[in-house]
Amino acid sequence: PPIVTQHLVSLGIEMIPTFEETAYWFAKALKGGITVATSDTTVKTRTYSPTVASDNLKTASIEVVTDTQAYVTNFCVVNRCSFGWELGGPATMQVDILGQQWVAATKTASLTTISSEEINPAATIAFIDTATIGATAALSVQSFNWTVENGFVPLFAPDGNNYPSNFYRGETRSMTTSMVADFSSTTEFAAFAATTARKIRTKVVGSAIAGSASGVRHIQTDWYGYHDEAPFVTADGKTQVRFTSESVYDSTATYDWAVSTATALAAVTAVGES
């Protein structure tokens, strides 16, 4: 029989996300162990920004079930996470996961589904600034997507097992973005040509949060950096620019990116919130 030298689980999950589901994935992909802030009685805000001095991402156990058998893989890490929206389409999200190996297990009983709301890009507000983030509306933006690469590499050891004993970071984290904007002004292309630092905020707003006076669901991304490429394209008779960009540390914000969400979800103990 063939010799099995290594086991490694590699999964790619694509989804149309909801405001509430992001809490599960962002704790593993962006930042774990966060403190949930309560405001306006029932609004629960989670803020995810990179921690420079430590690795606080959470691991996960992922279970799949067939007609006859359940399987689980433990100590999974999110190696890559993408989130984006496009006007006229749904929000999208993808997570790429690394795990040890599939093991036969008993199906977990009595699982419950949380109440959740799908993210609608039609209710998006975008800002692009040079000085103060969130000051200047960017009405030409048609789509925005960000990706965080965690750079995990499996560590195999001579421990008698053919699956990884650990994962370590092989590279520095950053948030890359892609943005499509109608070419209705030369401002943003001029910023690219002049290598001007950009501060971009996008905020997708949802419905009112029950029990609060004015709280609404939202997911907000703050990004600081420079455009790397800006090719012109034509779509639906319009001239557009497709910007691809890389985040850079901002001394005022004390990070290069941050993602925050507001929902009514009080706690998700499975992802290690405090």
Image: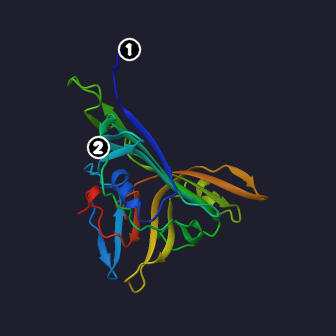
- In the image shown, does 261 or 150 lie closer to the viewer? 261
Whether 3 is drawn above or below 41: the answer is above
Residue at far front of view: 68
Whether 23 is drawn above or below 67: the answer is below
Residue drawn at point x = 37 percent, y = 73 percent: 264
Local SS, label 1? loop
Local SS, label 2? loop
The reply to whether residue 194 is in sight is no
Q: Amino acid at mark 1?
A: Pro
Question: What is the x, y in percent for residue 254?
Answer: 34, 61
- The 10 Å Cα crowd at callout 1, few under 14, some 14 to 19, many 20 or more, is few
Question: What is the x, y in percent for residue 241?
Answer: 67, 55
The C terminus is located in which quarter?
A: bottom left
Question: What is the x, y in percent for residue 76?
Answer: 33, 43
Q: Which residue is mark 2?
A: 106
Residue at far bottom of view: 213
Gap in Å between the C-alphas at discs 2 and 1?
29 Å
Q: Which residue is mark 1?
A: 2
Question: What is the x, y in percent for residue 57?
Answer: 30, 50
The reply to whether residue 10 is in sight is yes
Q: Amino acid at mark 2?
A: Thr
- Kindly report which numbered mark, 2 or 1, lies closer to the viewer in this rendering: 2
Residue at far top of view: 1
Whether 179 is drawn above or below 19: the answer is above
Relative to 227, 28 lies left or right = left
Q: Quadrant of residue 143?
A: bottom right
- In the image shown, does 144 or 85 lie closer to the viewer? 85
Query: Looking at the image, is mark 2 or mark 1 earlier in the sequence?
Result: 1
